[in-house]
């Protein structure tokens, strides 16, 4: 039996869901995302693999479909085709500059393009979309050569089977076979729901099938070309989004059940769980047999059976832990049915029960009352923890019932005047995009409403989070009545206030400043200092350094939340920060603060016993001097931005005592409004970390650290400086305080007396009368009762 796949590499760069992947060679893979980019990832180191990414195609809206044509006379380095919300099919030469116009823009679809595929010779491309259309295009002519007609719903998948034949997957539950000239050859029935994806089987496959298909009915179906059923593969528990084939004939699938599964001879032989809701896409490398997945957490992950290409033990352990810590919504775990905790087995079942198949799921009621989910691993002969089941937004009266199930929201959707509204149920654990899609599919409505409905859901649940109670305040309009009704075509809509603010769960970053201006200022200061003889040779930056820094402008513009700084870029900035005169350090500090969101920045600057926080401290950037106050602003922002990544949070956690000591002098006397805001955000992020049960912090030390933070926050709230008057900063500071109070009754009781006095000071500030500030102050008072 083959070895199991294990994590090989984790690729971060996209800022939204990764919707499509291609893995044509061991050196290169391509990805398409809702962040409006197609990226090319190039292998830079083989063991374990490291990839650098560049933007291959920049759009103005999201991409869904992606295809690759191998190098040929027309495309010396190959070509990619991509389509999405812009309704164009883009054809781009691989390796061409992202700013260069595409080789072709094929215009003809009336709606979002969901899928694209090249013909075998690369001269044609096939596309399908929400408009129920599928076209065959002559690329060089830029025109449609054939229409694939008959679809009664959106076309979700296309596959060019050979030089003559193309297949389409449709929301009307049908598979259609055409020739490339548009002639209909066959319609295959068998799916009981939307068909989404295909995979071509190699000749002589054990199944005897020519291709596989899958979709919303959660079953992989195997077919002969004449439409005869050759088998079914069951095991997924949610929509199946993507299929791929390995060189050895094993089939790979990805699903909304958080898993990638590998199938052999009719059985699932391995299940790879991910810490993400939707596994939108999966692809395989024909050269290595590696698997790559793309998910709703914006991350690309590569898996391999080759021990030499597998990640180091620490990275593998981190991936396993992220799965174990995953919060599984109860309605997902129970597939929409009432979750009967009292009927579940106890933890002994993990030792006494043996799974029937790989990927089988088992729910266990732990001794503390929690419900945990486990998957059976046939190769390891054990149950593996994949997460803890959690309730949705509140319980009891705050839940809305629809069709015998409970939801956080049930919206009225007016489709046609004079007819009763349709009901759109929604849980906060869902993606608004997925809820909108399911609503439109269930009610057989045009997909042209997709983006509008999804945005409307997001706007009307803004501020609400999993784990909160939703109890509108008295005298407020019923948020689920006519005031919250959606009408397709409406532009204006309002969202209700009244959602609970505590505890905060989302870390906040500060990504401010003009990168181009900062880099220009660094170059200008370097020249002035050099000309003035104020820098020794070690402190000077060379032309290579400035070239690297100029490249940062593009990196920060394209990927502000993970700009992937290089070691050379970081080293140049650290030279300016630590060796230049204090008053010339601001632009370098401003840039490096923004880089702190990137995991690669953390790994480069926090090696051994010394972290970037120690580097900043030894450089004196936290000194409280009015003439260098902006140095401290950006230094505190750097601490804030470390919380953007798991590795950064690990550093921030380990440096808690050092960091809080360094910034404490500014709590009592902030030197500027920007400094005060940065400080408030830092305290908020530390508060979130302490209540999140993060694995880094020992539970015994959480309360001790929380007591330190409460005192520091009190200093900020009781500060009489005019810089401490900004309402938004006041709100963040209060949210930090209130979040800490959710640690438990014992902690609240201990802190009660001192916090009551602090609230008195906060209430006297000018911003205290703003609605959101008043609301969070009331929630803090409620916590203290």
Image (cartoon, rainbow, N blue to C red):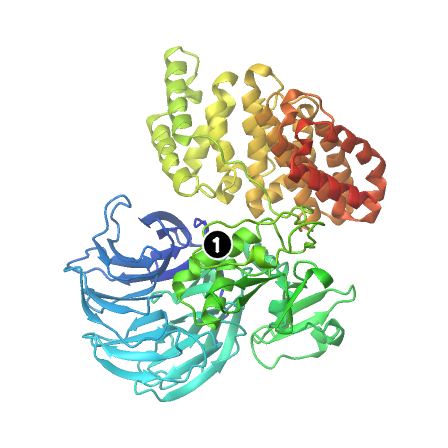
Nearer-the-camera pick, 449 or 377: 449
Q: Please provide percent x and percent y for residue 15.
A: 45, 49
Q: Can you tell which quarter of the image residue 130 is in? A: bottom left
Q: Secondary structure at mark 1?
A: helix
For the point 79% across and 49% down, the residue is 744
Q: Residue at x 81, y 35 (%)?
A: 756
Q: Seen in the image, is 15 located left or right of residue 372?
A: left
Question: Left of 650 or right of it: where is 511?
Answer: left
Which is nearer the eye, 318 or 435?
435
Q: Relative to 697, is 188 above or below?
A: below
Quadrant where the C terminus lies? top right
- Residue furthest to the top in view is 532
Residue nearer the viewer, 597 or 308: 597
Describe residue 413's horizontal placement relative to residue 400 as left or right: left
The image shows residue 393 at horizontal and vertical percentages of: 66, 58
Q: Position of residue 236 (x, y in %)?
A: 52, 75
Task: Indicate the position of residue 211 as horizontal and vertical percent values.
Answer: 35, 79
Disc 1: which residue: 455
């Amino acid at each position: 039996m083959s070895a199991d796949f294990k994590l090989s590499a984790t690729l971060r760069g996209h800022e939204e869901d990764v919707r499509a992947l291609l893995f044509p060679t061991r050196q290169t893979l391509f990805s398409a995302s809702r962040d409006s980019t197609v990226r090319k990832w190039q292998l830079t180191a083989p063991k374990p693999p490291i990839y650098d990414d560049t933007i291959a195609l920049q759009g103005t809206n999201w991409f869904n479909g992606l295809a690759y044509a191998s190098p040929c006379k027309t495309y010396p380095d190959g070509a990619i085709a991509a389509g999405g919300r812009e309704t164009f099919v883009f054809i781009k030469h691989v390796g061409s500059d992202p700013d260069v116009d595409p080789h072709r823009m094929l215009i003809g679809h009336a709606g979002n393009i969901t899928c694209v595929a090249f013909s075998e010779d690369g001269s044609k491309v096939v596309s399908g979309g929400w408009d129920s259309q599928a076209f065959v295009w002559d690329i060089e002519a830029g025109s449609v050569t054939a229409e694939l007609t008959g679809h009664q719903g959106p076309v979700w998948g296309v596959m060019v089977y050979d030089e003559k034949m193309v297949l389409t997957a449709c929301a009307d539950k049908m598979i259609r076979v055409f020739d490339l000239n548009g002639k209909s050859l066959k319609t295959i029935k068998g799916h009981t729901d939307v068909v989404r994806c295909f995979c071509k089987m190699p000749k002589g496959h054990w199944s005897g099938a020519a291709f596989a298909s899958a979709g919303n009915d959660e079953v992989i179906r195997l077919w002969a070309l004449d439409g005869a059923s050759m088998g079914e593969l069951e095991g997924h528990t949610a929509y199946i989004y993507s299929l791929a084939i390995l060189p050895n004939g094993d089939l790979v699938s990805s699903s909304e059940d958080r898993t990638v599964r590998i199938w052999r001879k009719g059985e699932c032989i391995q299940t790879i769980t991910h810490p993400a809701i939707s596994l939108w896409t999966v692809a395989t490398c024909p050269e290595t047999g590696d698997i790559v997945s793309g998910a709703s957490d914006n991350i690309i992950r590569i898996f391999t059976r080759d021990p030499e290409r597998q990640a180091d033990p620490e990275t593998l352990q981190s991936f396993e832990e992220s799965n174990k810590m995953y919060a599984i919504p109860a309605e997902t775990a129970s597939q929409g049915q009432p979750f009967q905790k009292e009927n579940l087995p106890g933890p002994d079942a993990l030792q006494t029960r043996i799974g029937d198949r790989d990927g089988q799921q088992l729910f266990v009621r732990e001794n503390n009352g929690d419900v945990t989910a486990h998957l059976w691993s046939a190769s390891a002969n054990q149950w593996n923890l994949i997460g803890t089941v959690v309730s949705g937004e509140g319980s009891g009266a705050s839940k809305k019932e629809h069709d015998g199930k409970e939801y956080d929201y049930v919206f009225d959707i007016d489709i046609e005047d004079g007819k009763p509204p349709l009901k759109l149920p929604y849980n906060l654990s869902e993606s608004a995009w997925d809820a909108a899609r399911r609503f439109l599919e269930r009610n057989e409505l045009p997909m042209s409403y997709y983006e509008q409905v999804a945005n409307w859901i997001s706007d009307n649940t803004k501020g609400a989070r999993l784990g909160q109670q939703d109890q509108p305040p008295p005298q407020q309009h019923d948020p689920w009545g006519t005031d919250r009704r959606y009408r397709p075509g409406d532009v204006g809509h309002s969202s209700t206030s009244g959602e609970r603010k505590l505890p905060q769960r989302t870390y906040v970053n500060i990504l401010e400043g003009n990168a181009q201006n900062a880099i220009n200022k660094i170059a200008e200061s370097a020249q002035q200092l050099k000309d003035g003889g104020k820098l020794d040779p070690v402190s000077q930056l060379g032309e290579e350094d400035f070239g690297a820094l100029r490249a940062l402008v593009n990196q920060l513009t394209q990927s502000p939340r993970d700009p992937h700084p290089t070691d050379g870029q970081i080293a140049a900035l650290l030279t300016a920060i630590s060796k230049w005169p204090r008053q010339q350090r601001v632009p370098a500090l401003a840039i490096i603060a923004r880089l702190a969101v990137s995991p690669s920045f953390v790994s480069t600057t926090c090696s051994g016993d010394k972290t970037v926080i120690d580097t900043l401290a030894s450089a004196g950037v936290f000194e409280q001097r009015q003439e260098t106050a902006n140095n401290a602003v950006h230094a505190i922002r750097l601490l804030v931005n470390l919380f953007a990544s798991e590795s950064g949070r690990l550093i921030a956690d380990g440096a808690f005592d050092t960091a809080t000591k360094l910034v404490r002098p500014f709590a009592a006397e902030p030197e500027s409004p920007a400094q005060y805001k940065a400080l408030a955000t830092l305290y908020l992020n530390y508060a979130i970390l302490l209540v999140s049960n993060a694995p880094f912090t020992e539970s015994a030390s959480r309360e001790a650290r929380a007591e330190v933070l409460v005192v520091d926050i009190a200093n900020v709230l009781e500060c009489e400086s005019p810089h401490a008057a900004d309402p938004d900063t006041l709100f963040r500071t209060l949210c930090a305080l209130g979040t800490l109070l959710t640690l438990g009754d014992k902690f609240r009781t201990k802190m009660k007396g001192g916090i009551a006095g602090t609230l008195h000071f906060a209430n006297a500030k000018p911003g205290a009368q703003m609605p959101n500030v008043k609301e969070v102050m009331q929630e803090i008072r409620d916590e203290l009762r």
